[in-house]
Amino acid sequence: MEQLNVLTISPRKDQSFILSTTSERHIIEKYKWRALRLGFVFFIMGSLAIWAINIRLGM
C-alpha cells in the first residue's frame, strides 16, 4: 500500500491542496521540468515569429 502524504494548512491562504499518492519532491520535479520545456518552446516560437516577420518585411 502506498503512503498518502498528509496535508497541512499552509501559511499562505491562496495555495490550493493537491491530493496525491506521489511524494512532494516528485511532483515538484515533474512541474519544474514541464516549466522548463514550456519555456524552451516559448523561446523557440518567439524566435520563429521574429524570423517570419523579418522575412516578410524584408529586413
Image (tube, rainbow, N blue to C red):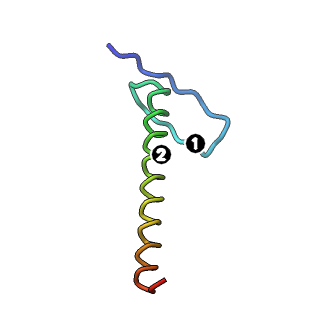
The residue identified by callout 2 is 36
Taking the image as shown, residue 9 lies to the left or right of residue 2, namely right
Q: Which residue type does callout 1 highlight?
A: Gln
Give the number of the mark in front: 1 or 2: 2
Q: Quadrant of the N terminus?
A: top left
Image position of 15 with respect to 41: above or below: above
Q: Callout 2: helix, strand or loop?
A: helix
In the foreground, 56 or 15: 56
The residue identified by callout 1 is 15
- The reply to whether the C-beta atoms of the residues labelled 1 and 2 are less than 8 Å apart is no
Label 1: how many residues lie within 10 Å, few (<14), some (14-19) or many (20+)? few
Q: Residue at x 42, y 20 (%)?
A: 4
Task: Say which quarter of the image contains residue 10.
Answer: top right
Image position of 26 with respect to 3: above or below: below
Image position of 44 with respect to 53: above or below: above
Q: x and y percent of residue 33 in the render?
A: 45, 40
Task: Say which quarter of the image contains residue 48.
Answer: bottom left
Q: Which mark is residue 48?
A: none
